[in-house]
Image (cartoon, rainbow, N blue to C red):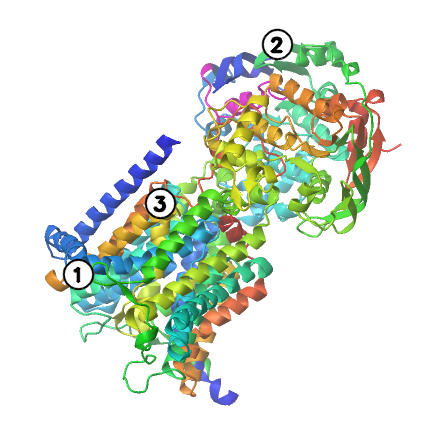
Amino acid sequence: MMSQSSFDRLSVALSIVAALLIGAAVIALSGTNPLLAYGEMVEGALTGSGLRNTTARMIPIVGMGLALSIPFRAGVINLGGEGQMVLGGLAGTLCAIYLPGPPALVMAASIVAGAVAGAFWAFLAAAGQIWLKLPILISSLLLAYPARAITSYLVRFPFADPTVTSSSTVPVPDANRIPKLPLFGGVSASLVLLAFFLVAIAIFNQRTVAGYETRMTGLNSRFSRYGGVGVDRQVVWVMLASGAIAGVIGTHLVVGETYRFLDGDLVASGFAWTGLLVTLLASHRPLPLLAAGAFFSALQIGGLAMQRNVNVPWQIALVVQAVVIVVLAGRFVLSRRQRAQPEEIPMAEGELTVTGEV
Amino acid sequence: MFDQLFDGALLESVFRALIPILLAAIGGLVCERAGVFQISLEGMMLVGAFAAVAGSYLGQSALLGVTIAMAVTALFSLILGYGAVTRRGDPIVLGVAVNLLALGLTSFLLPQLFGVRGVFQHPRIDGLDRLAIPFLSDLPLIGQALFNLTIPGYLSLLAIPLIWLFLFRTPIGLRLRGVGERPASAETLGVSSTQYKYAAVVFSGLACGLAGAQLALGNVVQFAENMSSGRGWIAVVAVMLGRAHPAGVLGASALFGFAEGLGFRLQGNGLPVQITEALPYVVTLIALALARKRFQRILELTAA
Amino acid sequence: MSNALELRGISKSFPGVRANDNVDLEVRRGDIHAIVGENGAGKTTLMSILYGLTAPDSGEIVVDGRTVRFNSALDAIAAGLGMVHQAFKLFPTLTVAENVVFRNEPRTGIFLDRAEAAKRVRALGSEYGLMVDPGARIEDLPVGVLQRVEILKALYRDAQVLILDEPTAVLTPQERDNLFVTLRRLKDRGRTVIFITHKLGEVMAVSDRVTVLRGGRAVAHLDTASTSPTEVSRLMTGRNVDLDSRPPPSLLGEAVLSVTDLTVRDDDGLVRVDAVSLEVRSGEILGVAAVAGNGQHELIEAICGLRPADRGSIVVGGREVAAADMAVTRESGLAYIPEDRHRVGTAAGGEVWANLVMGFQRRKRFRRGRFMRRAEVEEHARRIIADYDVRVAGPAVTAATLSGGNLQKLVVGREMSHAAPLLVAEEPTRGVDVGAIEFLHRQLVEYRSQGGGILLLSAELWELLALSSRVVVMYEGRIVAELDPAETDEAELGFFMTGGSR
């Protein structure tokens, strides 16, 4: 057990080193000194306003990672986080803009609205798998495109701010914005929400019966079903939870960050995909997920500083992120489920033959 | 309104939309037959598009661009090949990561190499010419759509019967299907599943390179960040929906091409672009919902 | 007569098992040579060594007087060996001809010569009485025909020695008789047949010579003509099979399972269980005997709630569960030892405790509200580990590290510790060593004596006869006989299992 997890840690560390080296090679090949670029990255991510920006960016990255970790851990592959986040974001934003009432209540309502919209979109994918036998992997991904189209249409036409040239909503009224915390010079209070999600998920995973059951489904869904677990119901609610958190993150990105829902803005930064990589890197465990999210956030914020200062595009951060996962998956230490394949189990007498299969 | 919609021009835009999807789907189809779960078509197409534009820009020749696109994408496909075949890594995790790597890499290299963000257009980029076949291209309705295509366009249509012949009428095709269905059984007869799987993955790289070239040098003459925009995923779905049969995959690709072409046309008729752009994805979802029960393999793969 | 094949001093060990211990074997050319032994005697290991699938630790293989080394099945094929595995190695969506010629395809130019392939298959078929439509798809064919395709595959590759591993396990009596005709015809054409089985009747019916394996050793080489079933059986088991050692009957109580008029379809909509009625009362073991694929597995799945019933009623512990899922049947008092411990019975990636609490996780004892009582759970795991002698360092170890036998003990221990009124046991002793079999048998009898009712499925007829209070025989989805184990034998069971009727 110990050796297994320290082996995992070693693999993760090795894959990060490998990815950074490959990133350095890409930078060098494209004509910049990689040491200079990485130096700028570290400085940009951790000093001055960098620390605040890194922390701020952890909210969507860790948040989306947590959102996706819930279904992933249960063996359900939700690739549609983006759509759930965008729709949730718009629903939350519209609430924050148009709902009358005391600001605290409006803020709460807009977060709930974001959660509901995200959960609804995720539910469509879950329903598709259960009743139409349409894999969530595909349906959740494809559903992201209409989700983007719907928000794009709404933002450009019914809810457009006619006073600006960009297609966006009017800004969220000052009072209804999620406030900043006095941390590193102002990080959104959504951080508290993130901490709540993190702790709740950690407790759920570690301590509850349902957390145990979802993990078993992720390892072997037939085993779970055999043990009396209602696997279909589980698929629905892990997707609901996932979509809800994604929706809240979407809401945060507007009501807590940009204050206007700008068409295409939420998807441009690829938070849903970075979140996906983060949960894969962390094997869907909340605390490692926080660490992985912090790392990727620093990488992106540092990348932006590097772009400003030495004119190396920040997207090298995306390259490094993806390479970490490619290397890890290629080392075969990373699997959605650590299932021993029957043919790899040392064969003793009587196990060589399996009947019943053609 | 309908007779305004359905005419030769619509058919042309259908084919325009169809060809990149079909090319990628052909790659996916061969992988599926070889038992490789290939969901990195999207990323490979993007890499192909980028390499095509880069090659065409540097060499000022569209054909050079196409060649470079195919070579680069084939190399790029080895990442999935090594991870999924040699290391037996999780094909879904690898596929997703490879797609994101492609997106990151192309959006990094675009400003780094060409100094522009978002979209790269340049007079030095040589676009693919459409080659009209005499007489046939003058046929009403279908002439321009079918017989006035780029080289990748003709290749995509030719590939359908050729792949069919290869899979179902040659010994190598037979072995490939055997490997895909029961690799262990193929191994006991001395057919190396690793070899065939690698070959299939590299083939999908070549096909996606071609698809990307068509996208960036045929449909338009430019590279835009994330310009594959889901077409590779639609190709993945087309493979499933067409049950990895050349004719089925052609049919499924045509359906999506039609949806996109129609969307394009409806745009001209006043529907907001945001709605019509979603049309292919919605059509895909509806087709999937109607197809049912065709996804046992992927359900088994994904549902632990 | 020369030897087509010899094995000299073959030994092979797996962790914890000495599967083959200095085995010698001489197979004469043109013989049908039977290799018999109980499960776990080392037959399968010996055959996979012979066919190049497993490397022996020591010993040599001699084909036609030449010592050979096989690095893969391909070498064995090249040396003139052909194997018909118990699990067929065919490609379901390819045609018969495509399967037969795979990798040795006749061609015209770059194309596959499909006409020639079909012609060759037909020619071989008529020579050996193995008629198969070359254009048929494998997935559409019945099991008996698939076996013919496997034999054709070997013959197409010009196999001089054919090895058949438990070839009759999945056959109907008709198919079995046809197979025997084929084997004799192969012998007449000068080919050699090695025939692995544990069924004595078949040994006597078809073989020329017999080698008996027991505990990994070859304990006897006999001429079939000069031996008897009793002698072979004694050599196989190392004891006189004594069915009178059956446990005394215990007091019968109320019905814990009543199945009435149950019909179940498989995934393709075919009726697999056809109007079956049966009852298990507390204090008895009801054995179900059937050849693989006669609906017994679907029957079990329906009872457990893993497969919907098409029609009829299933009552577990007084509750109608025909439409229920596994959660409900478990609540109603059912525990289930599944046939496939890897795919169904365990999660290899989970810890031992996580595997042992499955099915119990919602019990009051193991939770406080929505939270799991980990201390209780681990205590429960430790108790099962101790009671069932699961060889593992502790509850936190990953289940993937357990050997097959240990995993089986884990599954059996978990399900028995439910003390459910009804225990459904599917192949409870498959793949465990002889000592563990005796242990598990005692446990099953004890379970019954304490008032549990057991529905027992086993491919081992002697096991059914040794444990059951009653045995029913299923054939093509129906119950065709109910027998008293004290007054029947394997032969009679086999007769009914293969569609015989009186």
Question: Disc 1 vs disc 2: which is toward the camera?
Answer: 1
Dot 3: chain letter = A
Q: Can marks 3 and 1 be said to lie on one chain?
A: yes
Who's the residue at 46% across and 48% down the image? A204
Residue sitting at the far right = C502
Who's the residue at 30% across and 49% down the image? A292
> Residue B217, percent across and down?
28, 71
The residue labelled by disc 2 is C219
Identify residue type, mark 1. Ser
- Dots 1 and 2: beta carbons under 8 Å? no
Rendered image quadrant of residue C380: top right
Q: CA distance from mark 1 to mark 2?
A: 82 Å
User: Can you tell which mark lies on residue A329?
Assistant: 3
> Residue A78, percent across and down?
45, 57
Magenta region includes residue A259:
no
Sequence order check: which comes first, mark 3 or mark 1? 1
Identify residue type, mark 3. Ala
Question: Disc 2 vs disc 3: which is toward the camera?
Answer: 3
> Residue C275, percent across and down?
81, 45
Q: Is residue C364 above or below residue A99?
A: above
Please tell me which residue lies in front, C245 or A45.
Answer: A45
- Dots 3 and 1: beta carbons under 8 Å? no
Identify residue type, mark 2. Val
> Residue C73, percent across and down?
48, 29
The residue labelled by disc 1 is A49
The reply to whether residue A120 is visible in this rendering is yes
Dot 2: chain letter = C
Question: Disc 3 vs disc 1: which is toward the camera?
Answer: 1
